[in-house]
Image: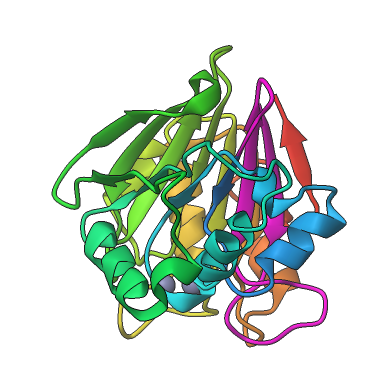
C-alpha cells in the first residue's frame, strides 16, 4: 500500500501546502482520502488524474477536507474513459449521504450521471465502523472528537501494512486505540496549545497520543501557521518515536 500526502495544509491559503488530501493506492486502485480545494490540481502534479480515481473516503465534511468533491464529480462527466461507467463509491461518517443529496439538489446533473453512482457507505458516528475497500484494503473507523461527522480512519493493506489518519480531532482516546502499534500515523497537529474548543490537537496532545499508541512512524500535518513546526516536532520527538512534518507529495510505502 502506498499512502501519499496530497495536501498537508489547512484552510489557510498557502502556496506550498494544499488543503487536506491523501491518496491510498493498493493493487492498482487509487482512493482519495479527503480533498479540500485544489486537490485535483495537486493530484495531477503527482501524476494522478482525478477522473481515474476509484472512489473517495472522507474524514468529515468541513470544507478544507471535501471542497473538491464537486469538481471531481463534475470532472467525471468528462471522463478519460468516456463514457465512465464505473461507479464512484464514497465512504464517510453518518450524514454524508444527506450532505451529498444537498449538493445534488444544488448542482443536479452537472455532478451526477445515469452511467455511474456515488454509492455512499456511511460509517457509524457512535462506535466502530468497518468497510472493505477496492484493492482489498480494510477501512476501520472510530468517531473523532470534532464536528461535521468526523471519523478517525485506519487502512490495513492485504499484506498487513497499517496507516492511520486522524482527521480533525480534539484529544480522543479512540485515536490512540485505532493507532495502537500501526506502521504509520498521520495526525493533525493544528494548534500550538490546548484548543479552547477541544476540537484540534496541540503538540502536547500529539505527544500523549504517540506515547499511548506507539506507532512505528509519525507524520504531522494540518499545522496552522501559528503552530511552530520546529517546536512541535521537538515536543513529539521526546516520546522517542520517529516523527517528521508531512509535505505535499510525501509518500510512504509498506
Ligand atoms: Zn474540521
Ligand atoms: Zn481541517
Q: Considering only vertical position in the picture, is 220 above or below 48?
A: below
Q: Considering only vertical position in the picture, is 184 above or below 236?
A: above
Q: How is the image coloured?
A: rainbow
Relative to residue 115, is residue 94 drawn left or right? left
Q: Residue at the location (44% across, 60% down)? A: 112
Location of the N terminus (image quadrant): top right
Residue 66 % position (x, y): 49, 67
Q: Residue at the location (45% across, 44% down)? A: 116
Residue 251 % position (x, y): 77, 42
> Of 41 and 164, which appears nearest the observer?
41
Relative to residue 104, is residue 4 drawn left or right? right
Does the magenta-highlighted stretch encompass residue 28? Answer: yes
Q: Residue at the location (54% across, 14% down)? A: 158
Relative to residue 141, is residue 209 drawn left or right? right
> Of 2 and 183, which appears nearest the observer?
2
Total marks shown come to 0
Location of the C terminus (image quadrant): top right
Does the magenta-highlighted stretch encompass residue 91? Answer: no
Residue 214 % position (x, y): 50, 35
Q: Considering only vertical position in the picture, is 214 above or below 36?
A: above
Residue 62 % position (x, y): 41, 74
Q: Residue at the location (70% across, 41% down)? A: 81
**Is residue 137 something one can see in this rendering?**
yes
Q: Residue furthest top?
A: 159
Relative to residue 45, is residue 214 drawn left or right? left
**Is residue 202 something one can see in this rendering?**
no
Magenta stretch, residue numbers: 1-30
> Of 15 and 87, which appears nearest the observer?
87
Amino acid at each position: 500500500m502506498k499512502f501519499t500526502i496530497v495536501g498537508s495544509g489547512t484552510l489557510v491559503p498557502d502556496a506550498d501546502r494544499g488543503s487536506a488530501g491523501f491518496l491510498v493506492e493498493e493493487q492498482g486502485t487509487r482512493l482519495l482520502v479527503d480533498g479540500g480545494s485544489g486537490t485535483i490540481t495537486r493530484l495531477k502534479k503527482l501524476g494522478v488524474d482525478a477522473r481515474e480515481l476509484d472512489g473517495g473516503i472522507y474524514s468529515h465534511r468541513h470544507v478544507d477536507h471535501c471542497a473538491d468533491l464537486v469538481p471531481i464529480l463534475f470532472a467525471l462527466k468528462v471522463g478519460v474513459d468516456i463514457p465512465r461507467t464505473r461507479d464512484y463509491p464514497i465512504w464517510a461518517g453518518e450524514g454524508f449521504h444527506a450532505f451529498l443529496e444537498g449538493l445534488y439538489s444544488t448542482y443536479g446533473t452537472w455532478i451526477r450521471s445515469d452511467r455511474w453512482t456515488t454509492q455512499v457507505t456511511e460509517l457509524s458516528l457512535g462506535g466502530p465502523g468497518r468497510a472493505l475497500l477496492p484493492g482489498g484494503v480494510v477501512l476501520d473507523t472510530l468517531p473523532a472528537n470534532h464536528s461535521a461527522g468526523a471519523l478517525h480512519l485506519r487502512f490495513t493493506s492485504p499484506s498487513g501494512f497499517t496507516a492511520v489518519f486522524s482527521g480533525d480531532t480534539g484529544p480522543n482516546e479512540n485515536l490512540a486505540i485505532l493507532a495502537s502499534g500501526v506502521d504509520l500515523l498521520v495526525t493533525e497537529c493544528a494548534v500550538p496549545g490546548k484548543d479552547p474548543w477541544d476540537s484540534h490537537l496541540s503538540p502536547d496532545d500529539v505527544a500523549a497520543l504517540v506515547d499511548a499508541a506507539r506507532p512505528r512512524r509519525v507524520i504531522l500535518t494540518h499545522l496552522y501557521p501559528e503552530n511552530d513546526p520546529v517546536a512541535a516536532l521537538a515536543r513529539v520527538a521526546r516520546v522517542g518515536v520517529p516523527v517528521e512534518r508531512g509535505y505535499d507529495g510525501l509518500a510512504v510505502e509498506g
